[in-house]
Image: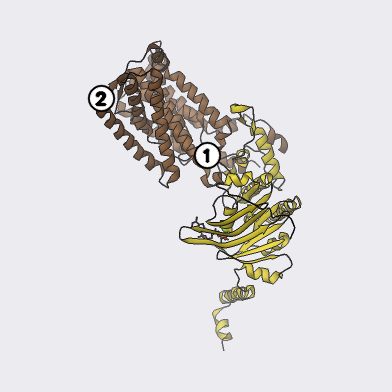
Chain colours: A yellow, B brown
Amino acid sequence: MSAQPAIIELQNVDKSFGPIDVLMDISLKVHAGEVLCLLGDNGAGKSTLIKTLCGVYTPTRGKMLMDGKEVHFARPRDAQEAGISTVHQFGGTFPLMSIGRSFFVGVEPTKGWGPFKRFDRKTANAIAVQAVQDFGITRIDDGDRLVGGLSGGERQSLAIARAVHFGARVLILDEPTAALGVKQASHVLRIVNEAKKRGLAVIFITHQVMHALAVGDHFAVLIRGRLAANFMKGEKSREEITDLMAGGEDMATLEAQIAGADTELHSPAHARAAAKP
Amino acid sequence: MAALSATGRRRATLGGLVRRPETGSLLGFVVVYVFFAVLGGAVFLGAPGWSSWLNIAAEVGIIALPVGLLMIAGEFDLSVGSVVPAASMMTAMLGGHYEMPALVAILGGLAVGLVVGWVNGLLVTRTTIPSLIVTIGVMFAVMGLTLGFAVLIKGSTSVSYVPDPLTKSLLGRFINGMFNVSILWWAGFVAAFYYFLHVSPLGNWVFALGGDAESARNAGVPTTKLSIGLFMMSGFAAAFVGVAQVMTYQTAQVAGGQSFIFNSIMCVVIGGVLLTGGAGSIVGIVLGTMTFAVVNQGIFFAALDPNIGSIIIGVLLLIAVLSNDIFRALALSYATRKK
Ligand SMILES: Nc1ncnc2c1ncn2[C@@H]1O[C@H](COP(=O)(O)OP(=O)(O)OP(=O)(O)O)[C@@H](O)[C@H]1O
Ligand SMILES: [Mg+2]
């Protein structure tokens, strides 16, 4: 799509856990200022793919490139130092730690010099609280509060705010809107657009068609570990995308099934009996 | 107001104090101390009383600090019980049997602890065996090796060593004939561990590791190195106590040291460290250690049956765990109840 090499690229990547092949022959490119929506059914391998991208897993086969040069991430820290920042599907916050401390795990702000560096609690708290308030969660105003006292959505916002704060080149979000309210979810979509405008590559996993269509420039669909489709915005219709998100099944059929179950449940037995020829 | 409280100092309100996890440990210490002060009278309140419980507190306290850090990080270390005699034996062997300089003997003893800690760390991080089991296994292995080498080299289960006066005065002296110099070393360890856990940025990693190891690794914390480092710290501290024991008593025994296993864990838990990891403090561990030592020695001053001491320790432990839960719930609810 552009002459510049992609920020991040996978070439023929496989990932197996012992005998279990989870990813097979994945080749993908994400450019600067592009939002890749990674779609697929439960268990398709989306989380495994992004964990491979951010150094949690190393690929069993295949190559990974950044700016056209091959890279190897042995651990998440390596990916982080390369500017890849990730919100994982689960976890990411520490219930018994304060908001400020949790926000900066692994990248603690310090004051002082040499071996006598001190954790800078004030700065950590101020930045963390600001970042979460920017998310529209103004209820949080004290960085010393424990994360475990926050609601699920507030915790997720904290994790996303953290990734956005540290994401330098690539922002990866694994179902970031899953626990969020309407307001916070639309805020995440706005954040994704802002990151894109700043020239970041964004990889966004979601099961919600609306969210995918709202921000996606590029769509990749995984079906049982294989890349089943890989296309740009406008190349496929909304219906086709919806079908692909359902794991390749026809959405109309699924809807009919749901509607069928619905009438089964709600119509009185005699009505059904009467309806039968 | 929102911006103010976000950046402002932590307010020292009564409510804030109650929510601090150390408060329970402080209360426990005060109650226990007053109880034995009443029964033990002037002797317990004077220098003999203080020296006897501080001597005990210093020994177990030096080990309880890293054991507490490990517990915050979600791990146990039971091997400390065999590192104490192993390090004693190594020091006495090098200094007494082979007549090497004191410095070599001391470094040799400390190295035993570092190596055992390193092995613990490797086994825990490379396998999926829980640290409880790994360190029990390592404990028996080290115990066997200590006995084997002692019998092989010396043909006996105890080795004596008379340190030079300087070494003796640094590591094994009784100040005023009562206070073991270990008390000062303990104070030094407390300062170092306080800095590590609460002031330096590394302390954040320990809490994160105990809170959620996978998220900590994903966030960029070098969890493997950190775990191995923590196990080496506890090995080192146990070895330090072993070395100091040789300098104090001028002899090393292959047995002994088993009491440190449960005692150190008890100090840590009475001090408010969460058994499942993720929370705890150095101030709490120190208070827990002092509480333990006061009960341990107060029994003699109060002329009570030693079995009663065991009962008190047991009850204290249960109360500590219960109150830990209550204080934790208060700390968490503060977030939701405030507005
Ligand atoms: N560490 C692992 N060891 C073995 N199998 C694994 C491992 N991690 C994932 N899998 C398997 O790989 C498959 C894909 O899992 P993955 O978590 O990537 O799915 P997903 O597309 O993110 O699904 P969801 O939409 O439910 O989040 C699943 O069948 C899972 O059981
Ligand atoms: Mg997933």
Tell me the distance, in whole angstroms, between the alpha carbons under discs 2 and 1: 52 Å
Residue A199, above or below A265: above
Q: Work out whether residue B5 or residue A206 is closer to the camera in this orientation and state it.
A: A206
Q: Residue at x 56, y 86 (%)?
A: A276
Tag 1: amino acid: Arg
Quarter of the image for residue B17 reads top right
Query: Does mark 1 fall on the same chain as mark 2?
Result: yes
Quadrant in the picture for residue B141: top left
State whether label 1 is within 8 Å of ligand 2. Answer: no
| CB contact under 8 Å: marks 2 and 1 | no
Tag of residue A93: none
Q: Is residue B331 above or below residue A199?
A: above
Q: Nearer the viewer, mark 2 or mark 1?
A: 2
Q: Secondary structure at mark 2?
A: helix
Q: Earlier in the sequence, mark 2 or mark 1?
A: 2
What quarter of the picture does the N terminus of chain B occupy?
Answer: top right
Q: Callout 2, which amino acid?
A: Lys
Measured as percent of width and height from the top left, residue B3 is found at 72, 37
Q: Residues within 10 Å of mark 2 (few under 14, many from 20)?
A: few
Residue B154: mark in rendering: 2
Q: Give left or right: position of B178 versus B218.
A: left
Name of the residue lying farthest toward the left: B155
Badge number at residue B328: 1
